[in-house]
Amino acid sequence: QVQLVESGGGLVQPGGSLTLSCAVSGLTFSIHTLGWHRQVPGKQRELLAAITGVGTPNYADSVKGRFTISRDNAKNMAYLQMNSLKPEDTAVYYCAARRTGINVYPYWGQGTQVTVSS
């Protein structure tokens, strides 16, 4: 059974930093691309960053230069380092996995809330 479990969300002040973690089990981690998404109520889920099994990252323009995605294949973990956080970054953040080369994410975590507020 595939499981993705996010952690690290919380309340942070504008300009602050937060690191999200995603623990993955039940799949061959190294052949899957991991993606971090977020969703605000009433809006579509947004793909923020993705990283292939060999560590090649890609970022949405909205977070490029502020967020860094990484992974540890030995620990089956993915991370999202978020810096210079803004109130508009407030959302539920999700980790997802897909086979590299297939453009659909079938595996999702339950999400973790990030709130940026003073």
Image (cartoon, grey):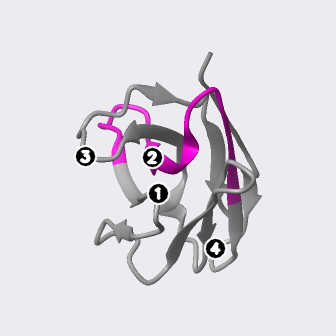
Name the one closer to the observer, 10 or 50.
50
Question: Alpha carbon of mark 3 to alpha carbon of mark 2: how far?
Answer: 10 Å
Q: Residue at x 39, y 38 (%)?
A: 98
Image quadrant assignment for residue 81: bottom right
Residue 34 image position (x, y, % from top left): 47, 49
Q: Are marks 1 and 2 in contact (CB under 8 Å)?
A: yes
Q: Name which residue lies at 48% across and 39% down.
A: 96
- Given the current orientation, which residue lies at the most extreme bottom position? 65
Comparing 89 with 78, the one in front is 78
Residue density around tag 1, few if under 14, some if 14–19, many if 20 or more, within 10 Å: some
Residue at the (60%, 35%) spot, across then down: 111
User: Of residues 17 and 73, which is closer to you in this image?
Assistant: 73
- Which residue is labeled 1 in the image? 53
Q: Amino acid at mark 4?
A: Pro
Q: Which residues are magenta?
A: 20-46
Residue at figure coordinates x 69%, y 76% from the top left: 16
Residue marked by disc 3: 101
Report the residue marked by disc 2: 31
The tag on residue 108 is none
Evaluate if marks 4 and 3 touch, with contact meaning CB atoms under 8 Å apart. Answer: no
Residue nearest the observer in this picture, 69 or 52: 52
